[in-house]
Amino acid sequence: RETAREALGEVANVAKNPEIRNLKAVLLDALCEPAQCTRLALDSLLGREYAHALDAASIALVMPILVRGMRDRTADTRRCAAVLAGNLALMTATGVTMTMTEALQPCLEDAAVVDASPDVRRAAALALGQLVASIGDLPPTLLPRLAGAALASPNPPEIGDIISGKFTAQHGEGVLAGAAQGTSERSGAAQALAVVAIELNIGIKVIRETAIPAVTAKNAATRQGAQYIMRYLSQCPDLDTSLVPDMLEANVVGLADDSDAVREVALLAGKMLVRHHGKAQLAVLLPNLEAQLGHNEWRIRASAAVLLGELLCLVGDARRVGFAEIDLDDDAGLGDHEVADAIRQ
């Protein structure tokens, strides 16, 4: 054991990053006693200010600690490991990041899709986006695997299914074997897919080619996954005017769905679309929502009224009744001539 620690110490001496070298003792403790010292090492790495890029030897020291942290029993430890993985990826040279990607992608996919904690799923999704941004390209297996998990695909791609953990021989044994697919898995996969797509500026392509065609699928889980994808990709900053009506139409299809789970997510997706693009796309959203108020399906009428209220509150900068933070005699937040002019236009 002491000989192994000495060998690890020699590896640490090769590391060129001064911040990592200063943490040599803490990192060696975490490598030799992972059960007791992993969290301390993660906290030390997160609390450090980095002024230098990470070299291959530095990453070699940190990588086992990150992988161990993302498989820890404690949700907060897994979240810290995911946050640290994303941050370090942005400070690493492209060639070294490619090596990181091979080791971290399965762990981050696992955390982003099947982890029980929403905070861990969110942190892992952001780390995947940072990992992709650092290499400036998309790993060929990432997008189809995330889309397959989000849409509950009955025919997983050849490169492997994240949920079942079935990989080809090229990728080895999966870490997600035996995981049951449910709403949280579809939500996590859609969130990670959206983060990666926005990072690479392919959000519009994913909406058109992956999400919208799936809203009419026979499988309710697939329809729910499509609405989840549109919910998270509604944050895409470069949505054009021609795409918003298509998204709203797909959203209306979800609002009339026979499945309660699909309708619930469709309403969330509609709210997200209104909140992020209501002011910029007011001329598109307002007439479309008004038209849905006369729809034959009562669920669509009710949801359209809710979304229209969200839109008018957004445009008028209004406050919900009962949540006013100032004197109720001051009705400045209830609307003015500028708001009325914007709606009329």
Image: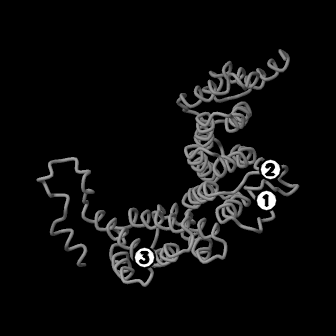
Q: Earlier in the sequence, mark 1 or mark 2?
A: 1
Give the secondary structure at mark 2: loop
Residue located 18% across and 68% down the image: 338
Which residue is labeled 2 in the image? 174
Question: Residue 299: image x %, image y %?
Answer: 44, 74
Q: Quadrant of the C terminus?
A: bottom left
Instruction: Depth check: give the residue in front, 210 or 60.
Output: 210
Mark 1 residue crowding within 10 angstroms, few (<14) / some (14–19) / many (20+): many
Q: Nearer the viewer, mark 3 or mark 2?
A: 2
Residue located 69% across and 48% down the image: 110
Which label sits on residue 241? 3
Mark 2 residue crowding within 10 angstroms, few (<14) / some (14–19) / many (20+): some
Question: Residue 260: image x %, image y %?
Answer: 54, 67
Residue located 41% across and 83% down the image: 295
The Cα–Cα distance between marks 1 and 2, rounded to whole angstroms, is 8 Å
Instruction: Depth check: give the residue in front, 92 or 165.
Output: 165
